[in-house]
Image (cartoon, helix red, strand yellow):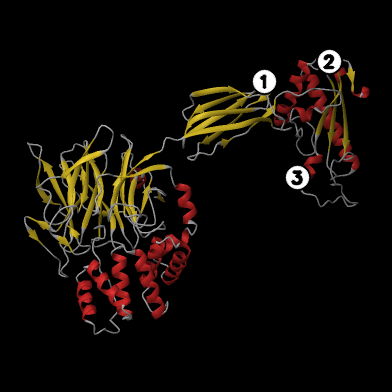
Amino acid sequence: MKIHILTIFLSLSAVLSYSQKADYQKANKAYDNFSYAKTSDILLEVANNGYTSVSLLQKLSNSLYFNNEMKEAAKWYGKLFEEVGETALDSEYYFRYAQALKATESYEESDAWMQKFYEANKDDLRGKAFASKKDYLESILSLSRDLQVVNLDLNTEKSDFGTNQYKDELIFASSRLGDKIYQWNKQPYLDLYKATKQADGTYKNVVAFNEDINTKYHESTAAFTPDDEVMYFTRNNYYKKRYKKDDEGVNRLKIFKATKNINGDWSNVESVHFNSSDYSVAHPAINVRGTKMYFASDMPGTIGQSDLYEVDILEDGTLGDPENLGASINTEAQETFPFINEIGDLYFSSNGLSGLGGLDVYVVRDFENKRESNQPLIVENVGKPINSSKDDFGYYENLGTKEGFFTSNREGGKGDDDIYSFKAIECEQIVTGTVLDKNTQELLAEATVTLYSKAGDKIETVIADQAGAYSFSKLTCNEPFLIRAEKTDYIGDEKNFVTLMGTEDMVINLNLEINIQAITPCADLAKILDIPVVYFDFDKYNIRYDAEVDLQKVLVLMNQYPTLKIDIRSHTDCRGTNAYNETLSSNRAKSTKNYLISKGIEASRLTAKGYGESQLINHCDCDSNNRSTCTEEEHNKNRRSEFIVTSINGKSCLDK
């Protein structure tokens, strides 16, 4: 019994033909009175007896759809389209058929009808949501979590849904008792109930919540202020023993407020000021500060069948004026059952966004801060196992006690709607990897590998084995960490990562770059010291500051190794005449030599020569007109400096 469907108004085309059967006339009356369970039973029997018309198929399909009998609805919507074709009906039928197919997990066929729906009305937010993310199934799978979901013992064969916590009690709605029958689904009207939390964390001893709150009509979805002194709840438009309907004979839903009296009982029930007999207001949720209430309504200004709204709770306890949460949240379908957690994440259910079927639960992370600062609101499907191909709604979580609840009419339940608890499965992740030489990819044994928390605190240090392998075990899933590897004579490597939610081990390899290289005769210090080129201004050979930084590296090394002698070689690209390039490179080589001498290096340890364009290292030579097809990057490779070790420790390059 989901009264999340605030009201149902169906715009049906004129009846094309009428059966003379008495059952059809009886079903028509039931349909017009919104008694869908009775309607679908009668119409189904008529159709199965071979009596069909377009009008009957429309009413039968819609009756099944709005009573959440989606498998049968999909069957009869299919027959309806076979009867009239794809273009004879309002595009809303495309949407309903797609939703019914999705509830049976016929996703490919459902997507085809959603595409037709989008093409028929490209301004509809539901179609836009589908078209913008056609890979929604993969996205939902990636957002799914490893949770333990349990059908609560307190569920009955009737409808139980819409949880909240009040101190050590679980508050929920149920149709388990009562003599007065609601024609929508032939179940008793809903009342609020409470169950007490036990030492083992379960909830038992279900009793009616409060006799001043419960009436002979519907009550559901309670919310409490942080001080536990005020509650808001949903009820039919029944106040002070007066049952009111709108001009069309529909009894709407309202939010009522109750306060604790001096005896600790709930009393002083009053209607909130924005209730109306002309629209519904339902399913309140209150933020942790007690400053905002969120709810669902189809009041004027609503985008779809029901939208989410917010209203300020003022310091004196009164309520401000409701404000629609806008098209970033709401669609032309149903957005309902809002819940705001302790850190400002907004959860709600919708059947207007891409999901697994029926109502799915969605979340906007950090909603309150983002809305206050006008930041974009990103709606995410919370994934499996919270969501299924059926209706999933009434999400509630307590981050302090790490408890969570939601309601679903999924397969395998005890009744119509059942309440499920969920909690994260204790998840531990193993991270393994290998420490490697970055350049040679050789395995590096005995490297030190350290694991840090997201706050930078050291957690554990291990030593890589002879194969360079390391491992860390029992890491919390879905947590950020930093891992760092170090080894003498190497530059360390580190990586940030977030552990996975599954059981598969994570593999993170770390690559260390050698920090010391052998200096041997004929070696090029430019490569060892990472000096690609000593830069000079155009057509000049004085040492620039940026070139001086690189030459300081050479200077440090020559001071460290007094026997080191080098030959400074300067090269140009092919552009310019041979003579010009040779002279320019010679002057630059000599300028480099003089710089090192000015810094205290003996002249006898240095030789210098310019080679112009005579030793190009690629194909970038110039033609007779001094032109080349090479890119500037290719020319740059030829404009280079070399610092060739001619001798060190008595060994000469000529000896090699």
For the residue pair 216 and 274, the one nearer the viewer reads as 216
Which residue is nearer to you in this view: 134 or 385? 385
Q: Residue 165 lies in what quarter of the image?
A: top left
Q: Residue at coordinates 82% horizontally, 24% vertically from top-left?
A: 593
Disc 3 or 1, which lies upstream in sequence?
1
| Residue that lies at the very extreme toward the right in this rendered image | 654
Mark number for residue 563? 2
Q: How many marks?
A: 3
- Image position of 403 (left or right of 321): right
- State the image coordinates of residue 525 (x, y, percent, origin top left): 79, 27
Q: At x 23% / y 72%, what residue is drawn?
A: 31
Disc 3 residue type (three-letter): Glu
User: What number is the disc on residue 437?
Assistant: none
User: How far separated are the C-alphas under marks 3 and 1?
Assistant: 36 Å
The amino acid type of the residue labelled 2 equals Thr
* Amino acid bearing label 1: Thr
Q: In the drawing, does residue 536 fall left or right of residue 57?
A: right
* Residue indicated by mark 3: 633
The residue that mark 1 highlights is: 488
Q: Residues within 10 Å of mark 2 (few under 14, many from 20)?
A: few
Q: Quadrant of residue 645?
A: top right
Q: Position of residue 655 (x, y in %)?
A: 93, 22
